[in-house]
Amino acid sequence: MTDYCEEQRNELEALESIYPDSFTVVSENPASFTIRVTSETGENEETVEATLQFTYVEKYPDDPPKFEIATHENLQNSDTADIMSLLTEQAQENIGMVMIFTLVTAVQEKLNEIVDQIKSRKEMEKLLKEKEAEEIEKAIFHGTPVTIENFLSWKARFDAELTEMKKKQKEDEQGGKVKLTGKQQFETDHNLDTSDIQFLEEGNNVEVDESLFQDMDDLELDDDDDPDYNPDLESDND
């Protein structure tokens, strides 16, 4: 007849020796304890962690123990679900034998795999970002290749803009908002050809006050003061 209590007590002593820094007793009756499992990684690498709680049932190890993930760090819901499935599978495979060390070892390996997956995912994300930046730089340098599709799209936008400009110009003309150049003004208004003549004709009617010039004869002006004086002409007259 199997002495379940003896087997359980012996396993607890062994586990406490194997995991001195991570083994913690939760209760004695029924016997329940936790073991903290951390991934094995190099320096400066991200780690993942799970604290497993095991509780013996009356007929353990002929019946599997109860287990759960008490706490965890850097694990996603899918990761914890995978760990629970792994524990269930390993427990069924080891019925009849003390199995806690085997279960913890399986979880340890699983955490290492998760860390490798995280590392690979980050490297892939880095490569994708570098590739995306390279493609953007290449597009800026080389421009967008002309295809039938993008040419037709550009042509449609160009025609629409041109039509809108013509429509606006027509509306401005109808509203008298068009600003004509000098040439266009002369071409459209022939009255501008003779507009300056009226100013010349009006100039003939300017009245001059002759009294302002009555004392001009009394002024003695030197030849040098005369603005019309030209000494060369005087020499020629002599």
Image: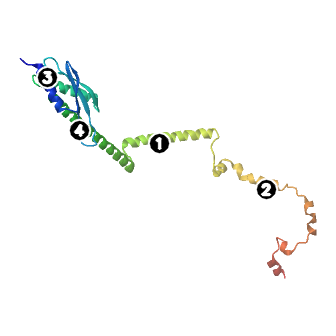
Q: Is residue 231 above or below residue 84?
A: below
Disc ID at residue 116: 4
User: First in sequence: mark 4 or mark 3?
Assistant: 3
Q: CA distance from mark 4 to mark 2?
A: 100 Å
**Where, quadrant-wise, is the C terminus in this rendering?**
bottom right
Q: Which residue is mark 3?
A: 8
Q: Nearer the viewer, mark 3 or mark 1?
A: 3
Residue 95 placement (x, y as % from top left):
11, 22
Q: Residues within 10 Å of mark 2 (few under 14, many from 20)?
A: few
Q: Residues within 10 Å of mark 4 (few under 14, many from 20)?
A: some
Q: Amino acid at mark 1?
A: Phe
Q: CA distance from mark 2 to mark 3?
A: 130 Å
Q: Residues within 10 Å of mark 3 (few under 14, many from 20)?
A: some
Q: Amino acid at mark 4?
A: Asp
Q: Residue 179 versus residue 141: which sits nearer the camera? A: 141
Q: CA distance from mark 4 to mark 3?
A: 35 Å
- 31 relative to 128 in the view: left or right: left
SS assignment at label 4: helix
Name the residue rendered at 36%, 44% in the picture: 147
Location of residue 40 by image quarter: top left
Q: Nearer the viewer, mark 4 or mark 2?
A: 4
Q: Is residue 215 above or below residue 229?
A: above
Q: Nearer the viewer, mark 2 or mark 1?
A: 1
Disc ID at residue 200: 2
Residue 227 placement (x, y as % from top left):
82, 70
Q: Which residue is mark 1?
A: 158
**Where, quadrant-wise, is the N terminus in this rendering?**
top left
Q: Contact, CB < 8 Å: mark 4 with mark 3?
A: no
Q: Residue 184 versus residue 24: which sits nearer the camera? A: 24
Q: Contact, CB < 8 Å: mark 2 with mark 1?
A: no
